[in-house]
Image: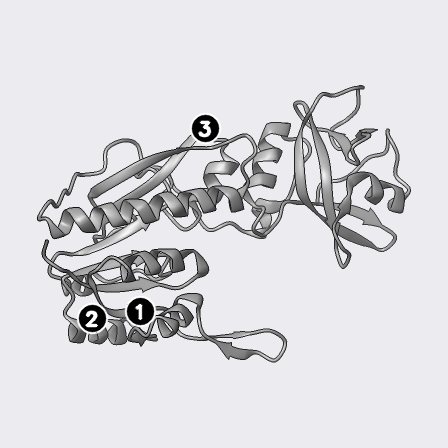
């Protein structure tokens, strides 16, 4: 099996497991490229990315180019056989992609062409998909449009939120990448055009997080699950002179036990949650985090706000 000279490009925590696999694959990691240090915390102290920190611990050459020109220069100097990209966070220009002899592989957390873009895991949960997966594909000049090498399906469990689904997809993706490196080293390169109707997964916003209780309960539960890693789903409670933002950390579907307008508290449950009427169905709000306070049960929140069955909540 011929060894490969690999340039790894990634930035956040989710990319670290992939770098560890590549570093242990027996191939040469010519360099690790991540985004530049960012100011963090109240003191705005510059901090390196998780991938950059891991590269230092693994004694790998690390680079943090601040521009497209710098990225091109780094890769031109490294002369890799293959680039591996996991959540790098920047588009790589077409002329830079040409610098790797075999091309650049990207790990994407959906079954392309579904959910192209920045937030495929969150959007799959928000859209209540039953199945998603991981795709290992070749980068081209488009946004997640390149030909497919390998892909693996993963069921979306009823208990999944963004954190649990990310964890399983990361493990499946690392296995898929390891298989891909073995096959490439053996000369087995597959480049199949993406097939099917594309869909898109834009970055989630605070507007996406607002719970509109006039919408179906299943849709709202999808938002709670999909946004568990932030920005969390939330509603706004009107108070004297202001509105209190209330994050919903955990929820389930419930039966509407009594009539009421959307946004009405229908009941307080023995397990510590409360049921709120939606446009279709009802949502059991188990755990919340009011602005500036700790997480608490839904029932404790209602008690603190002196709310009871029959009282309205309101969309922000």
Asked whether disc 2 touches disc 1, contact meaning CB atoms under 8 Å apart, the reply is: yes
- Residue 255 x/y as whole percent: 71, 21
Considering the numbered disc 1 on the image, is that residue within a helix, a strand or a loop? Answer: strand
Residue shown at the point (72%, 42%) measured from the top left: 287
Q: Which residue is mark 2?
A: 75
Residue shown at the point (34%, 56%) measured from the top left: 18
Instruction: Report which quarter residue 2 is drawn in.
Output: bottom left
Q: Which residue is mark 1?
A: 33
Of the residues under marks 1 and 3, which one precedes in the sequence?
1
Residue shown at the point (77%, 56%) measured from the top left: 293
Considering the numbered disc 2 on the image, is that residue within a helix, a strand or a loop? Answer: helix
Of the residues under marks 2 and 3, which one precedes in the sequence?
2
Q: Which residue is mark 3?
A: 130
Label 1 and label 3: CA atoms lie apart by 35 Å
Residue 26 relative to residue 278: left or right: left
Of the residues under marks 2 and 1, which one precedes in the sequence?
1
- Residue 303 x/y as whole percent: 88, 42
Label 2 and label 1: CA atoms lie apart by 9 Å
């Amino acid at each position: 099996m011929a060894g490969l000279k690999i340039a790894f490009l990634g930035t956040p925590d989710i990319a670290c497991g992939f770098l560890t696999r590549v570093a242990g694959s027996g191939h040469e990691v010519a360099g690790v490229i991540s985004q530049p240090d960012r100011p963090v915390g109240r003191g705005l102290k510059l901090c390196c990315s998780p991938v950059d920190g891991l590269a230092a611990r693994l004694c790998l050459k690390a680079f943090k180019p601040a521009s497209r020109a710098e990225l091109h220069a780094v890769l031109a100097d490294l002369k890799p056989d293959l680039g591996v990209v996991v959540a790098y966070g920047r588009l790589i220009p077409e002329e830079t992609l040409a610098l790797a002899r075999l091309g650049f592989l990207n790990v994407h957390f959906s079954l392309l062409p579904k959910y192209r873009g920045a937030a495929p895991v969150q959007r799959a949960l928000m859209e209540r998909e039953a199945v998603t997966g991981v795709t290992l594909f070749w980068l081209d000049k488009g946004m997640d449009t390149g030909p497919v090498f390998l892909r693996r399906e993963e069921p979306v469990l009823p208990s999944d939120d963004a954190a649990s689904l990310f964890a399983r997809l990361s493990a499946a993706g690392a296995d898929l990448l390891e298989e891909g490196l073995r096959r490439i080293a053996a000369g087995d390169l597959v480049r199949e055009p993406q097939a099917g109707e594309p869909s898109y997964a834009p970055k989630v916003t605070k507007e996406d997080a607002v719970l509109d209780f006039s919408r179906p309960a299943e849709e709202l539960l999808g938002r709670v699950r999909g946004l568990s890693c932030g920005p969390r789903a939330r509603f706004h409670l009107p108070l004297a002179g202001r509105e209190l933002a209330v994050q919903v950390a955990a929820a389930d579907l419930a039966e509407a036990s009594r009539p009421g307008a959307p946004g009405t508290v229908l009941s307080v449950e023995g397990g510590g949650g409360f049921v709120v009427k939606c446009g279709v169905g009802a949502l059991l709000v188990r755990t919340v985090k009011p602005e500036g306070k700790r997480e608490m049960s839904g029932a404790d929140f209602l008690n603190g706000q002196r709310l009871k069955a029959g009282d309205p909540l309101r969309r922000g």
